Image (spheres, helix red, strand yellow):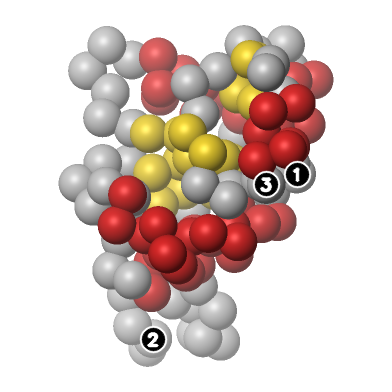
Amino acid sequence: MGAPGQRKNGQPNIPSVTVREAQARLAEPESDAVLIDVREVWEYVEVRAQGAKNIPLSELIRRVGEIPHEKDVLLICHTGQRSLSAAAYLQRQGIARVFNVDGGTEEWEQAGLPVEHG
């Protein structure tokens, strides 16, 4: 049996949420969830899920101290691959409550969920 948070094959076991589940979790009045967009700044400025904080994957190692340990951390990128890598890294750093937002910003926007520009 592997360590907590790992599958038998040694790959990280990252829980995922749909874009609608992520948005609903963030909208709950008592929510302690945060949404972190790991895309590069130019992508984030173009369009992002409403309320997302930008910590690009390329800066994550340097900025890991900005990630709360005591909250649900919802990670989003363009389609879900970079956020999956970010989630695996954060788990290795001892941040247990990380979730990958499946489909990323692309699906968030296609679902008609609130976005911000600029």
Q: Could you tell which of marks 1 and 3 lies nearer the N-terminus? A: 3
Circle on res. 40: 3
Using the rendered image of the protein, determine whether residue 13 is visible from the camera's viewpoint: no
For label 3, count other residues whose C-alpha is less than 10 Å away and answer few (under 14), some (14-19) or many (20+): some
Q: Quadrant of the N terminus?
A: bottom left
Is 88 placed above or below 22 here?
below
Give the quadrant of residue 85. Answer: bottom right
User: Quick check: 31 left or right of 92?
Assistant: left
Using the rendered image of the protein, determine whether residue 76 is visible from the camera's viewpoint: yes
Which of 109/59 is in front? 59
Please tell me whether mark 3 or mark 2 is closer to you in this view: 3
Is 80 placed above or below 31 here?
below
Q: Could you tell which of marks 1 and 2 lies nearer the N-terminus? A: 2
Give the quadrant of residue 64. Answer: bottom left
In the picture of the structure, the residue carrying the numbered disc 2 is: 2
Give the percent coordinates (x, y) of residue 39: 66, 46
Instruction: Give me the residue at 42% from left, 64% from top.
Output: 62
SS class, disc 3:
loop
Circle on res. 79: 1
